[in-house]
Every structure is written in C-alpha cells, then in structure tokens.
Amino acid sequence: KRLQLIRRANTIAAEDFRNLLRSPQGAGALQYLHDRGFSDEVIERFELGYALDSWDALLRHLRASGIDGEIAAEAGLAKERDSGGYYDAFRNRVIFPIIKAGGTVIAFGGRALDPEDPAKYLNSADTPIFKKRQQLYGLNLANKAINHENSVIVVEGYTDVVALHQAGMEHTVACLGTALTESHLDLLARYADEIVIAYDADRAGMDAAVRNIPMLENCGADVQIVILPEGLDPDDCIQKRGTDGFLQVLQSRKSPVEYEVELEFAKQEDRGREGLLQALPKVVDILLRVQDNTRRGQF
C-alpha cells in the first residue's frame, strides 16, 4: 500500500508541475526553456514542469489529494524539518520527471532558476521505487530509437538528452546525477550492441572516462568514447555547431583502450623522445589488460 501511495504522490506531483509550467507563475521557467532552444513540442514530450518558489505548495496540493508529508518525504518530494514537519524538496526549479518505460513517474530532477542557488541541479534521493544508480533519464522515450539504431548515446545531463532528441537523435539517455555504473551498462546492453558515451571535454569528464575504462571494456556491448570539443557539452554543441556538427563529433569516437593509449602519449607529447619512452611502459600495461588476444593484437 505504501508503494502505491508513493507512486500516486509522484503522479500527482508530475501533473501539478506540468500545469504550473503553463500557468502565469511558470512563465519565467517556460521562457528559460524557450531560451535554451526547446520547442513546445519537446517540452510536452518530456513532460517538463515547474516547481513553485514555495516551501509547502506541493505539500499542500498533495495533502488535498490524501497524501501526507511522511509519504511525500518517502517519495523524495519533501524533506523533514529538524523542528518537525516537512517542506518541499523542489522549489523554483524547472522539473524533469524520470519515467519508467511503462510510463510510471518514479522520480524527478530539478534545474535551479535562481543563479545564486548553490545546487544548480537537484535529483530525487533514492526511494523504495527509485535507485538512481540503476535508472537512466529518457530511456522511456529512447527505447524504440535505440532498438532501431542498435546504438545508444549516453550523455551527462537532462538538457543534453532533450536537445539531442529535438535534433533527431532520439537514441540518447543520461545518467541521473551519478557516475555510469555496471547496472547502467548491463541495462543498455540489453537494448543495443553499441554504447557511445559522450563526455564533456573538461577535467571531470576526462577523468570519468579514464576511471571507467576497465568497466567499459568488460561490458557486453561495444562501448565507444567521444570527448566533446573544449568547453562544450552536447546541448552547447548542438546550439553552436548544429546537428551535422554534432554528428561529425560522434564520428571521432574511439574504443576505451584507444582513448587511454592516446591519452598516455598525449601527456608526454611535449617531451619528445624521452616522453615517448616514459609513456611506453604505461601503454604496455594498458594493452595487457585486454584479455582477448586477437583484440589485443589489433591494438
């Protein structure tokens, strides 16, 4: 019964957020999305919404529908006050509902509209029906395109997914404020033979690429890595270079091993012959990790 109440709380919240985005109070949030280049059609498709700049607007709405603060907190929609009682978890944010393939809303992501808000993005905490390390944003809308393409693009953010779907690359999903996990890869390998991971070209993105390489190599699908041009995330890349420009970037994808080998040589490229000699033992270690002899020989 509690699980049913949690699902109902999410359904009510999602509908409320959607309605608020189209209300006078949501005008600023809707303008933000339009300024990002998102059409009304894609906003409707992803069921985007708006959370009021209020401490208890959603709680009051839920209570009117028979959902108390305890259930709202268990659903990740509210937080408990130290002094007792509850307050809304999402306030003054564009809302991205996280929806399972069957259409059930299981969680939310929120993008702050206040530039002074220290938490630019806020994700639902894990709940009895939502584990962020096992879920992917946009999979409910991408699964048919993934099957058709036999390929899936994995990006880092909500807006990246929306932008790429709008540009026609509907086989795109994102992790939910967490690093890529084996559970994510196992899930995607059921849908497609190729997984293309598009990392941002900042230090965090490159570090994530290297950190994940052993896991990527052991995946049941063919995993490829794309490092985006400096300073651009997929959304920016689409805005500045267009769909064709982003498709060209995707053509530069490489296997995790190729990426790691090139990175080792790149670290030493300014040191000439001496740098090359420094890089070689590390490259040998990378190649020795490739278990398949034929594949290792190709590299």
Image (cartoon, rainbow, N blue to C red):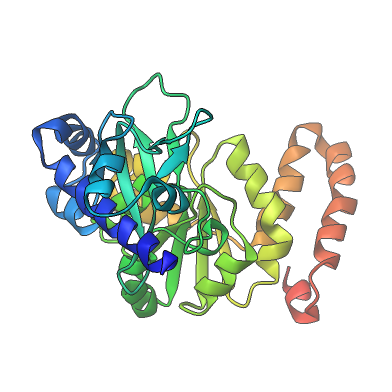
Give the x, y percent position of residue 46: 25, 56
Give the x, y percent position of residue 59: 31, 42
Location of the C terminus by quadrant is: bottom right
Q: Quadrant of residue 101?
A: bottom left
Q: Is residue 144 left or right of residue 40?
A: right
Give the x, y percent position of residue 149: 37, 75
Q: Kindly tell me whether residue 7 is visible in this rendering.
A: yes
Residue at point 44%, 47% (across, down): 73
Q: Quadrant of residue 148?
A: bottom left
Give the x, y percent position of residue 298: 72, 73
| Residue 50 vertical position relative to residue 215 in the rendered view, above or below | above
| Residue 54 vertical position relative to residue 282 in the rendered view, above or below | above
Residue at point 66%, 60% (across, down): 256
Q: Kindly tell me whether residue 223 is visible in this rendering.
A: no
Q: Is residue 14 left or right of residue 3?
A: left
Residue at point 26%, 40% (across, down): 60
Q: Along the line of sight, which residue is nearer the eye, 196 or 119?
A: 119
Q: Along the line of sight, which residue is nearer the eye, 273 or 212?
A: 212
Q: Is residue 133 left or right of residue 280?
A: left
Q: Along the line of sight, which residue is nearer the eye, 41 or 241?
A: 41
Q: Quick one: which residue is furthest to the top in this view?
A: 116
Q: Along the line of sight, which residue is nearer the eye, 263 or 22?
A: 22
